[in-house]
Image: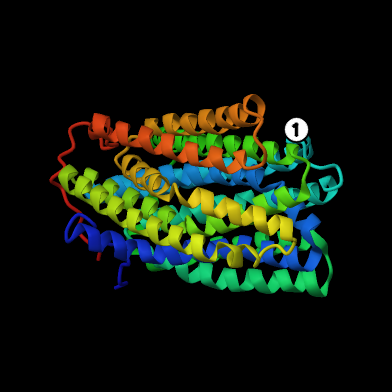
Amino acid sequence: MLQSAAQDMTKGNEASQIVRFALPLLAGNLLQQLYNVADTAIVGKQLGDDALAAVGATGSVTYLFYTLCLGLATGAGIMIAQFFGAGLMQRMRSAVWNSAIVTSVFGILISICSIWLTEPVLRLMHTDPDLMQMSVSYMRIACGGTAAVAAYNWINAVMRALGDSKTPLIFLAVASVLNIGLDLLFVMVLHTGVEGAAVATVASQCIAATACIIFAFRRTPELHLTKEDFRISGEMLVLAMKTGLPIALQSGLIAISMSALQRVTNSFGSKPVMAAYTASMRVEQLIQQPFFSLNAALATFSGQNVGAGKTERAERGLKSGLRISSLLAIVIAVIFWIAGGVIIRCFISGEDAVSIGYFALRTTSLCYIPLGSIHVVRGFLNGAGDTGYAMLNGMAEVVCRIGGAFVMTTMLGMDYRSIWYTTCVTWFVTGLVGWIRYCRGKWRSKALLPAGHSAAVQYAPAD
């Protein structure tokens, strides 16, 4: 008999369960960020600030395509977590198979579209003509691997929904080491430029996705699908899209707002500003990983508990998550104010770019508490099935980023500092919108369980 790695999160101390579940997620997220850190450090130090700026010019667009897949995977995880928490194992297995179909189809379509749209989108964003060729080459390869990103995010969401945050970490660790090795090989030994860095990242993602899927389905009893489970269910396909698409669109809206901010950055026509923006974004992506991990932990925790009918326990988990995220925000802000300059020099060497990057880290760190609350509340509401809020959340970020950048640069005539002031305003307003949504209580009626199901049915481990 196989030992299941699945974990029932409807019992036990809420805070300790969330922390134990989030720690492997954090380790995995940090390793995943090594993909970006390796690209940034190796490209910046070996190929120069122009190459780093070229890679950075693609960041928000690449993020757009990646997060569309992540949203669909997150939706699949919500379905599976609620069915698992409610003890509806046959429906859970059906959700696994049908969500795989939806995620695969969308992942392939997004890969194709992203390659086709690369150059027009970069031109629309006013990418520096001197950097255009490098940016196009990097983005076409990186976005061509979106299908692999979709596959990995899907299996990761499935395992998280079952309470297993450790299995994906194992394979991601191997892929991270491989990614750094391939980066060094392609860029420093074979001298393939920014294209080599992109190939290294895509190859590592493919390996992580393939290995994790094979291992998870062989070693997790809950994922041993029967012939009946492989049936295409119109109900499950619709539910997967209904749950995942709002989150995907939310992610897309956030990415669009970031692309608009990238365009503002490019419009200053200053390579030091662009390099500083790229480096500061890489650093902030890294330090946001604890918040992303809490987001995923709260989504699984609330999903299982809402499925089991334990909404009060789910709310206690939310409050624990907010306390943890606030403490993390304070610690990270202190570090950036003390050592932000040293940190930013790990990515860029030009004195002007370093000075701007240091300013960026100090400024945005003042709003890390609302940033943390965004992730925690968003994870809680998503897990509860209130994915309609996702669109509202995305719209709030679009309005704040685009509107804030327009007001500060066009109406007030502010300089490059408006980029990071806009980010602070966006986090504060979006965090407030999420808290209002939670307090209104609509999430209580959003569970994905079938009509008439008794929440008293609990999960029993498979033999």
Q: Is residue 53 visible?
A: yes
- Residue at 51% x, 46% y: name it: 70
Give the color scheme: rainbow, by chain, secondary structure or one colour.
rainbow
Q: Is residue 27 left or right of residue 105?
A: left
Q: Quadrant of the C terminus?
A: bottom left
Nearest the viewer among 39 and 216 is 39
Amino acid found under the numbered disc labelled 1: Leu
Q: Is residue 101 visible?
A: no
Q: Quadrant of residue 407?
A: top right
Which percent across, then down, holds residue 377? 33, 43
Residue most extreme to the left: 456
Q: Quadrant of residue 387?
A: top left
Which percent across, then down, holds residue 215? 46, 67
Q: Quadrant of the N terminus?
A: bottom left
Which percent across, then down, holds residue 366? 45, 49
Nearest the viewer among 48 and 104 is 48
Question: How packed is label 1: few (under 14 Cα within 10 Å), some, or many (20 or more)?
Answer: few
Q: Is residue 267 left or right of residue 12?
A: right
Nearest the viewer among 301 and 72 is 301
Say if 360 sits above or below 166 in the image. Answer: above
- Residue at 40% x, 55% y: name it: 329
Q: How many marks?
A: 1
Residue where numbered disc 1 is placed: 124
SS for callout 1: helix
- Residue at 21% x, 57% y: name it: 14
Q: Is residue 150 left or right of residue 380?
A: right
Nearest the viewer among 318 and 111 is 318
